[in-house]
């Protein structure tokens, strides 16, 4: 008996860029129990939200006299977003920032930002001071980041900083092929004084995949696909609200027109150039107390 090979490669094998979007769908199914969230939403809330979104669409259709050609283009595109596995990418790029604003606007501590599609829980723990996993000869400017976790009164907290970011080519481990599993992903646990010191490299600006459905939308609308260079963090301490944030670098041309609308002025770092060419930066986090 001969084995028949699957003639169509799975989405994750096609190209690196499209693969990033599709891997994000696999990751979402694996880690986020999305169907529990669906069950927990009360009918009145679904009625309100779905009803209002549909009305907004009807208004747009009427106001701009949307044609059947445009309606069919929309249908074809929506079907393709699912087939490409790009719904997490689409939602995190174009909607999540508004959800994040609403979720965190009561906070007195640090500003947060969106999680995006490329977080993976369980990165290796490196203690309070360490170097994030990287390849031999990892490209990029070395960056040493010293900081402290405190409460909103400035008292030190024993906590944890999970850091993940793209490499010097703008690729994330576990979402682009050929990169070691935990490359540029690490967890830093502080002692009681709350301080940490992380050695990493500066990430490159990030272009969202242009070869899938999100890329087609961007091209069709004449938009650009760029996010400014950024570091992703989740900062936590017992009894305090989890802070999900991103940190940015001054002078990046996309700080003012991030495709994901996720830059806030409080999140822009001020790196210093050391005599040996490495860069250092100081940035602390104040966490709000957990609400009961
Ligand atoms: C990213 O790296 C990212 O952080 C977001 C929010 C969306 C797409 C890619
Ligand atoms: Fe990112």
Image (spheres, rainbow, N blue to C red):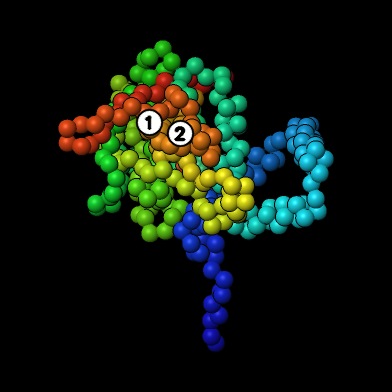
Say few, some or many: other residues with alpha carbon within 10 Å of mark 1 (under 14 / 14 to 19 / 20 or more): some
Could you say which disc has been placed on residue 135 in the image?
A: none
Name the residue beneath numbered marker 2. Answer: 255
Asked if the beta carbon under badge 1 is closer than 8 A to the nearest atom of ligand 2, the reply is no
Q: Quadrant of residue 75?
A: bottom right
Q: Viewed as shown, does residue 177 lie left or right of 81?
A: left
Q: Residue furthest left?
A: 275
Whether 63 is drawn above or below 283: the answer is: below
> How far across and down, in percent of the image, does residue 89 sit?
56, 47
Q: CA distance from mark 1 to mark 2?
A: 8 Å
User: Is label 1 in contact with label 2 (beta carbons under 8 Å)?
Assistant: yes
In the image, what residue occupies the spot 55% across and 24% down? 104
Residue 79 visible in the picture? yes
- Which image quarter holds the C terminus? top right
Identify the mark nearer the N-term, 1 or 2: 1
> How far across and down, in percent of the image, does residue 186 sit?
35, 41
**For this rendering, which residue is in front, 63 or 164?**
63
> How far across and down, in percent of the image, does residue 252 sit?
40, 36
**For this rendering, which residue is in front, 135 or 240?**
135
In the image, what residue occupies the spot 53% across and 81% down? 3
Name the residue beneath numbered marker 1. Answer: 250
In the image, what residue occupies the spot 48% across and 27% down? 264
SS class of the residue under badge 2?
A: loop
In the image, what residue occupies the spot 45% across and 25% down? 265
> How far across and down, in percent of the image, does residue 119 sit?
47, 43
SS class of the residue under badge 1?
A: loop
Q: Residue furthest top?
A: 153
Residue 87 visible in the picture? no
Count of number-bearing discs: 2
Q: Residue furthest bottom?
A: 1
**For this rendering, which residue is in front, 226 or 79?**
226
Say few, some or many: other residues with alpha carbon within 10 Å of mark 2 (under 14 / 14 to 19 / 20 or more): many
């Amino acid at each position: 008996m001969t084995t028949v090979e699957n003639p169509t490669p799975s989405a994750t094998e096609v190209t690196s860029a499209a693969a990033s979007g599709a891997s994000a769908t696999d990751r979402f199914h694996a880690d986020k129990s999305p169907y529990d969230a669906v069950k927990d939403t009360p009918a009145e809330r679904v009625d309100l939200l779905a009803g209002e979104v549909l009305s907004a669409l009807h208004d747009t259709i009427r106001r701009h006299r949307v044609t059947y050609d445009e309606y069919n283009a929309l249908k074809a595109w929506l079907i393709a977003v699912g087939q490409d596995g790009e719904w997490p990418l689409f939602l995190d790029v174009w909607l999540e920032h508004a959800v994040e604003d609403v979720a965190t606007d009561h906070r007195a501590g640090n500003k947060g930002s969106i999680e995006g599609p490329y977080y993976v829980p369980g990165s290796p723990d490196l203690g309070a001071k360490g170097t994030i996993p990287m390849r031999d000869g990892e490209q990029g400017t070395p960056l040493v980041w010293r900081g402290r976790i405190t409460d909103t009164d400035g008292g030190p907290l024993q906590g944890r900083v999970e850091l993940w970011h793209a490499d010097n080519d703008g690729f994330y481990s576990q979402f682009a092929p050929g990169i070691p599993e935990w490359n540029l992903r690490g967890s830093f646990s502080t002692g009681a004084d709350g301080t940490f010191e992380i050695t990493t490299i500066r990430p490159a600006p990030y272009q969202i995949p242009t070869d899938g459905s999100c890329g087609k939308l961007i091209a069709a609308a004449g938009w650009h696909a760029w996010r400014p260079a950024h570091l992703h963090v989740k900062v936590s301490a017992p009894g305090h609200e989890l802070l999900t944030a991103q940190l940015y670098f001054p002078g990046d041309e996309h700080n003012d027109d991030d495709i994901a609308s996720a830059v806030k002025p409080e999140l822009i770092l001020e790196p210093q150039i050391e005599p040996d060419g490495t860069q250092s930066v100081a940035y602390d986090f104040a966490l709000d107390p957990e609400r009961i």
